[in-house]
Amino acid sequence: MSTATSTTTESPARHIGDSHDVIRVQGARENNLKDISLELPKRRLTVFTGVSGSGKSSLVFGTIAAESQRMINETYSAFVQGFMPNLARPDVDVLEGLTTAIIVDQERMGANSRSTVGTATDANAMLRIVFSRLGQPQIGSPQAFAFNVPSVSGAGAVTIERGGKTVKERRSFTLTGGMCPRCEGMGKVNDIDLTQLYDDTKSLNEGAMTIPGYTADGWGVRIFTGSGFLDADKPIRDYTEKELHDFLYREPVKVKVGDINLTYEGLIPKVQKSFLSKDREAMQPHIRAFVDRAVTFTTCPDCGGTRLNEGARSSRIDGVNIADACSMQISDLAEWVRGLDEPTVAPLLTALRETLESFVEIGLGYLSLDRPAGTLSGGEAQRTKMIRHLGSSLTDVTYVFDEPTIGLHPHDIERMNKLLLQLRDKGNTVLVVEHKPEAIAIADHVVDLGPGAGAAGGTVCFEGTVDGLRSSETLTGRHLDDRAAVKDAVRTATGSLSIRGATANNLRDVDVDIPLGVLVVVTGVAGSGKSSLVNGSIPTDAGVVSVDQGAIRGSRRSNPATYTGLLEPIRKAFAKANGVKPALFSANSEGACPNCNGAGVIYTDLGMMATAATTCEVCEGKRFDASVLEYHLGGRDISEVLAMSVEEAEAFFRSGEAHIPAAHAILSRLADVGLGYVSLGQPLTTLSGGERQRLKLATHLAEKGGVYILDEPTTGLHLADVENLLGLLDRLVDAGKSVIVIEHHQAVMAHADWIIDLGPGAGHDGGLVVFEGTPADLVAARSTLTGEHLAAYVGA
């Protein structure tokens, strides 16, 4: 009996499993989204665009990525979920076809002073193992090369139950760490100026302490006055030697102050723990000012700033110790690792080499592993986070990027585009929030949100191809091919700011004169030394106002009114008009609704489930006590004023009964930077990156200064908003100010009066001024990478 096999030329029917090729969003209402529905193709690159505040982040991060992460978290046990952040379900009717989302956002990396590029990317962990195996002399385990691990040893008797008897045995232990004992792994030592801590002509009861928060009746001082070690009525200069030692340096000891048991310790260790253990950039402004006054930081003389002890620095591979390796430019370190040939650690060397080569591939080869993580810009931090995904074997993953071209020169954007396309071509869905035309051009699918920002946005204006967007009549479509022309006439400088012999970071003894009274753009590829030149070499005296990319810090109780200081004159005006206290008109003080404590919502903790937030039934989300809302100014109560947009409030406080010049001035600045649509009481946590940047710019415009330094002010700005920003910069210059902008955006370069171009490359290949002159001269010469890209941009 024979069996025959039949073959058919008909193609098999498509498997049902292959039909799920879209992410379907239906009825999204997160933040300002207006019940929008759309379908996004999987395994394609989709770019979301629209003006700042139009709802891009609410759709991509707040809805799609948030729901994906929430559902992944729900696959873990309730016990594990208890240790994870609770994520509420986004306000959306249907989300289908989601895949695992990997979010690569712009959030700055932890500004912990012990965190470096190496520790944040695991490159240091691998390097420590390499040195523990190959370094000569051998000094111990990988911990012996870790600057965050101190060397400790101890000995003593331990009691053990054995065979029904209690026996004592002597035990000892040692742990060899790599931390420098002098600076405790910080690389810097500090000297505290005692005159900035207290006034020695006064006693403690007379308020001798001059440290922020140490008031005569506060616990910070009461523990000293009630400890029994000191005479609280004696001037500090009259203390005996023992009293002064107890006051400044005493070891921690338990004391009783009144009926309360407390731990007393000297003022110096107390200040070091409470102020100096924190990163300077994460401090509140008044605390930072105190630390700058009271503390001088110098490079540790024992370790030379390497953070490592002598043992860790003594072990070498081919004459290189781990401190030398970490201080190398990563592109050079990759070359050095490539030259190591040791079969015993071959898999480790391969993994380390791949990580370092990823840095180079993504355009961060100019960094070094010992660079503090807190000093990375938003764009550098985002690309550093990308590194762990580049070599990943995962497919069918949704990668979500928030403006990956931030901080990138046009030359570097081409490289970033290639990386995004590589991720897509591996079979992944790539969702990108972006404003740059060069990045929008590579999209397979474009979603344009708008038409405006805030309440005027939140709808899908266009969905389709890039060519379709170009021919559409949306704001993005109209501006997509905008090309700024180089100015025919430039302003004449009124003076110059001379920088001589600048050597900060990678600068190579740079001499440059920055013209004053004009708009100056400092540009160059990422890592060429722009920030080092401007921020590291221009003295930040009273006449210089610097607006960097640092994140705005604020809770959900903070809003534009509190952040800008606008609420203060408004509260005083309400209080004066109604004959009551100003504190009543603050939802964070006496005027708060007693039910929700001024939050406007009630948060219910549901254990491992997402915390449920419901609008307060008593105040109906207005945040104020009902009695406070009976007081009016110009016919409006305080909750109605906070619900106004900046534009409405500017008109309201301009004249009439509610005329408040101080409030009107702040509102005018907010409108100037393009935030007219934002409501005064909108929580800071709901503002987009571009909105926060402009809010910060508006507050700095109030400072009295002759020189403004702006670090990439186009971050998060739509093409249409860039025109408004250029208008603002022009108004500043026309008002007699000098404006220096660190920028990559060609429209800003073309608009400049003077360009300083750094390069030619990044890291040690940069650090030189490769061009100084007008934009027209730069375009004509085309002698630098910037010149070539600017010439192509203006169509020269």
Image (cartoon, rainbow, N blue to C red):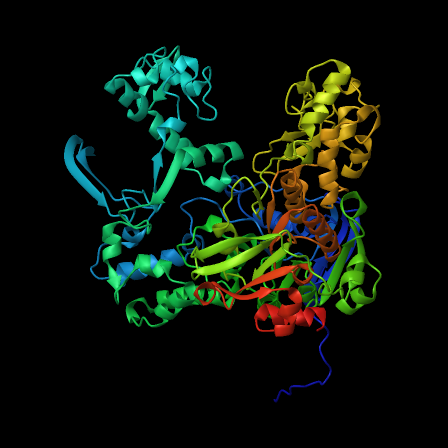
Q: Name, please, the residue furthest toward the bottom.
A: 2
Q: Quadrant of residue 4?
A: bottom right
Q: Residue at x 41, y 16 (%)?
A: 222
- Image quarter in which the N terminus is found: bottom right
**With 594 as the anchor, is 103 left or right in this view?**
left
Can residue 675 be seen by looking at this rendering?
no
Q: Residue at x 75, y 29 (%)?
A: 661
Residue 772 coordinates in the image, percent (x, y): 57, 64
Above or below — where is 434 with respect to 424? Answer: above
Q: Quadrant of residue 636?
A: top right
Q: Residue at x 35, y 69 (%)?
A: 336
**With 348 as the anchor, is 69 left or right in this view?**
right
Task: Tell which of 794 and 108 is nearer to you.
Answer: 794
Above or below — where is 322 with respect to 565? Answer: below
Residue 557 coordinates in the image, percent (x, y): 64, 32
**With 367 as the anchor, is 401 left or right in this view?**
right
Can residue 45 be seen by looking at this rendering?
yes
Q: Residue at x 31, y 66 (%)?
A: 345
Residue 546 coordinates in the image, percent (x, y): 57, 45
- Total number of numbered labels? 0
Above or below — where is 592 with respect to 484? Answer: above
**With 224 as the anchor, is 428 left or right in this view?**
right
Above or below — where is 155 with respect to 102? Answer: above
- Image quarter in which the C terminus is found: bottom right
Residue 637 coordinates in the image, percent (x, y): 79, 23
Q: Quadrant of residue 245?
A: top left
Task: Tell which of 364 and 429 is nearer to you.
Answer: 364
